[in-house]
Image: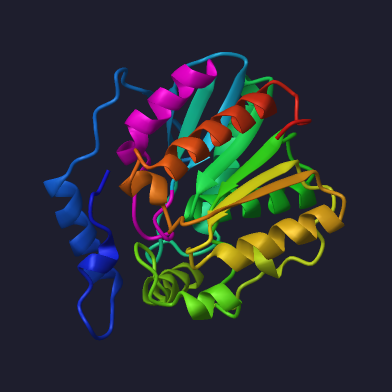
Amino acid sequence: MIPEPLTAHLPDGPLSVALVRSIDDRLRAANPPPAPTTRPAVVTTAGVQLRVHGGGEACVLWIHGGGMFLGAAEYEDAFCCDLADQLGAAVVAVDYRLAPEHPHPAPLDDCRAALAWCAERYRRVVVAGRSAGGGLAAALCLLNRDQNGPHIAAAHLWYPMLDDRHETPSARELADAPVWNRRLSELAWAAYLGGEPADRYAAPARATDLAGLPPTYLDCGDRDLFRDETADYARRLEAQGVQTRRFEIEGGVHAFELFDPAAAISVQTEARRLEALRRSLGEDFRTW
């Protein structure tokens, strides 16, 4: 866990990917992520590295956050190891390529390769991710539906990065939000899109046809830049017949549970997420 968010260290003036990465590297070096109790098995499929935690007949395909240009699956080894232990299932973390060196659709292609690998080995697959990982999970569900890919049992999107346009009320009102602000979000989308226009697979909020997607769990804090794009996506999923459950966490900023895990909202949210994942893996969505 990084105890201080990037936004606390950003200088005034223009941002660059190299500058933000250097700040992120410095923060991580000062506060390295905890070591997992059990090291994952590392495998490669279609050139994509997967980190496999735990085992069983079902799995969670985990997609890490970081605005599409930060982060790595390895940083979340301890989280994925703990999650696998709590669920009694496998957690497969995909180390997708990062923008801007590998813009859209490269990260999504890597997630699709990871899904194919999981579908060949596990009876039931749930896709999940936070922030950029949640956005990639949503995009993966759209692409998989359109290509008649393997069955996805459910999608779990935690404060997902869905919309490149920054036109929602929360994108305007919370432009200076802590942890992840509009400056960072605009930089992230520019890196991910690489100068190309966004389609529904890059920015799932742009999708008009959401019918036939897997049951979807979403949550987001009410002080998060992504609050309204999450709420709007959930409303449209439900309107088009997708089993949907959304929670808006009062007082929650972006990634609140990572920066203050002992807070009541963090404890409650993590317990709800765990139970929702457990029900998705166990084929029981009735009380999400």
247 or 250: nearer the eye?
250
249 or 18: nearer the eye?
249
* Residue 202 appears in view: no
Quadrant location, the C terminus:
top right
**Residue 123 in the image: x percent, y percent?**
69, 20
13 or 112: nearer the eye?
13
What predominant SS class does the magenta segment belong to? helix
Quarter-wise, where is residue 18 in the image? bottom left
Quadrant location, the N terminus:
top left
On screen, residue 143 versus residue 182, left or right, reads right
Quarter-wise, where is residue 240 in the image? bottom right
Height in image: 151 above or below 85? below
**Residue 285 in the image: x percent, y percent?**
75, 31
Residue at 41% over, 52% down: 255
The colour scheme is: rainbow
Residue at 33% over, 45% down: 260
Q: Residue furthest left?
A: 30
Height in image: 225 above or below 240? below
Residue at 49% over, 68% down: 225
* Residue 19 appears in view: yes
Question: Is residue 73 shown in magenta?
Answer: yes
Q: Residue furthest bottom?
A: 13
Height in image: 61 above or below 87? below
**Residue 215 in the image: x percent, y percent?**
75, 41
On screen, residue 97 versus residue 13, left or right, reads right
Height in image: 149 above or below 124? below
Question: Is residue 285 shown in magenta?
Answer: no
**Residue 87 in the image: x percent, y percent?**
53, 20
The magenta stretch is 65-88
